[in-house]
Amino acid sequence: STYVMWFHLDTAGYRFRHAGVATSTSPAGPFSFVHGLQPDGIPALDMSLFADPVDGGAYLIRSCNNAFTGISRLSADFLNSTGLISNHSVFEGMALFRHVNGTFYCIGSH
């Protein structure tokens, strides 16, 4: 198995605004850095991930340059985003989940 870790990759002054991606063969590491990116070409700050237990897909939820909260589907290998699929007003501490009726919900601050 390969374990993928996404993390906020930034400078002390929050000027870099990237996500970092690393992989490991163990959930406890060690992890190897794969790349840093601005998912979908958009600066990224506070972020979270959601793995859908129904279809096995994964999603990145993040503050997009503090202008809006964006949701992107991840690639099949979980190493990249595949495009912005939804955007909302800014909030932090986002948590995405799927209700048993199939509806997706995202909760967070504010």
Image: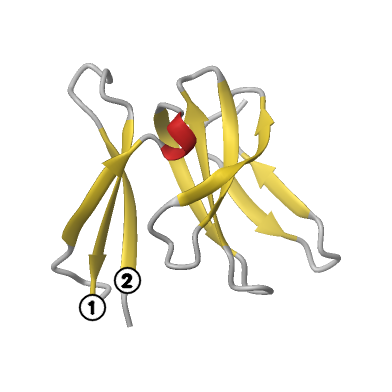
Name the residue at 75% across, 53% down: 104
Residue that label 1 marks: 25
Q: Looking at the image, which is closer to me, 106 or 24? A: 24
Q: Residue at x 18, y 22 (%)?
A: 12
Q: Is residue 6 above or below residue 13?
A: below
Q: In the picture, which quadrant includes the C terminus?
A: top right
Residue identified by numbered label 2: 3
Check disc 2 and report its element: helix, strand or loop.
strand
**Marks 1 & 2, CB-CB < 8 Å contact:** yes
Q: Quadrant of residue 54?
A: bottom right
Q: Amino acid at mark 1?
A: Thr
Q: Is residue 110 left or right of residue 42?
A: right
Residue at the image point whose x is 65% and y is 42% from the top: 107
Q: How is the image coloured?
A: secondary structure
Query: Quarter of the image holding residue 85?
Result: top right
Crowd tier of the residue under label 2, counting other residues whose Cα lies within 10 Å: few below 14, some 14–19, many 20 or above = some
Number of numbered discs overlaid on the protein picture: 2
- Residue 80 x %, y %: 42, 52
Circle on res. 74: none
Q: Is residue 61 above or below residue 99?
A: above
In the figure, is residue 66 to the left or right of 13? Answer: right
Disc 1 to disc 2, C-alpha distance: 6 Å
Q: Which residue is at the far bottom? A: 1
Going by the picture, which residue comes out furthest to the right? 101
In the picture, the quarter occupied by the N terminus is bottom left
Q: What amino acid type should be assigned to the residue bearing mark 2?
A: Tyr
Disc 1: CA contacts within 10 A as few (<14), some (14-19) or many (>=20): few
